[in-house]
Amino acid sequence: MNFSTHVMFGIAAGSLFFGKPEIILLMAIGSMIPDLDREYAFLSKESFRRRQVHRAFCHNFFFLGIVYLVNPYLALGAFLHTLLDALTTARDRGVEWLYPFTRLVKRAVYDANGNRLELVPKQKIYFQQNEVFGLTRKTTQDIKPGEQLPWRRTYGPALSGKLLDEGILLGSAALTLLLLLFSVLGIRPFIDLSFHPLSLSFALPLIVGAVGGLLIFVGGEIDRKKQANHEKLDRTYKAIFGFSIGLLIIALFLGAIMNAQAAISALSDILYIVPGMAVLTVVSFALLRVRSSGPLPSDDKEPTIV
């Protein structure tokens, strides 16, 4: 989905379900966050492109959980972004919801044509099938058919920028305007139009973080065009990228310092969330270990498929 569609959908959802300007703003910003895993700066290296980082690194449940610790409404916006991207086909990469756990399995039982592949004795756990050539034939260079990879992404029916993308963009804009009109005319106050000055403790971290994120997007797009023209990264861009990352870190610290109660509440949640994530990780690895301790797969015995 296009950048404008993600933002407008976040605004429409915030307006419909919450109506408070600060929540709408947070959801709009949250809807931008997942695309930070594009080929920007350290993600522009060829090794990262081969690993299909985009639509994976920041488009998964694990990342959404991290954003939730910062702010639930940011996480909700990021979730809506990821959900829309999951509707797109392999041409736009779909979404790898279970990254990084999906990267623990390296092989598939069947190739892109459905033919059974030769099993590797050391590999006990497999995906069902490698991605079909036709799915990835027209996609970006880093996931074009070449070295076959397991089918680990979720794909939908919609190509980005096509009918569904435009429909969501225009539909979200129309819905937001309709809710705004109802609120202005007093028919039903969907959106709170009363003036509430934003507190410094809310506005300052948000502005600093938004500027940092915007610099990453702007600088990243400049970098992508240079990469397309086979130009190398220059020091100016590297400095901008480093500065923008610094702004994001400063925004997090400012938010924690200036909103102590919210930070304490988030820390109290971490006391439950971190052990839960640790248990999930340990159980996942233990399950892989147990499954890997079984007998060697053979042509007459189906291996473990996840």
Image (cartoon, helix red, strand yellow):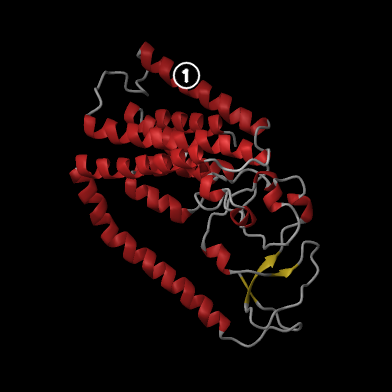
Q: Residue furthest bottom?
A: 295
Q: Quadrant of the C terminus?
A: bottom right
Q: As drawn, which residue projects farthest toward the front?
A: 235
SS state under label 1: helix
104 to the left or right of 76: right
> Where is residue 122, by image quadrant?
bottom right
Q: Is residue 168 above or below residue 90?
A: above
The quarter of the picture where residue 130 lies is bottom right
Residue 60 position within the rendered picture, expressed as x and y whole percent measured from the top left: 50, 53
Residue ID at (67%, 39%)? 228
Q: Residues within 10 Å of mark 1 (few under 14, many from 20)?
A: some
**Residue 20 visible within the image:** no
Image-based side of 182 in relation to 196, left or right = right
From the viewer's perspective, is residue 65 above or below residue 127? above
Locate residue 146, reporting x and y percent.
76, 58
Instruction: Please give the name of the residue rendered at 65% of the width and 44% of the height, measured from the top-left corner.
Output: 92
- Residue 215's place in the image compared with 71, above or below, is above
Q: Residue at x 79, y 65 (%)?
A: 114
User: In the image, residue 268 lies at what x, y percent?
Assistant: 23, 56
Q: Quadrant of the N terminus?
A: top right
- Along the viewing direction, whichever of 192 and 237 lies nearer the viewer: 237
Disc 1 residue type? Leu
Quick check: can you spot residue 25? yes
In percent of width and height, residue 209 lies at: 36, 37
Reading the image, the residue beneath label 1 is 177
Quarter-of-image position of residue 160: top right
Give whichever of 47, 71 is nearer the camera: 47
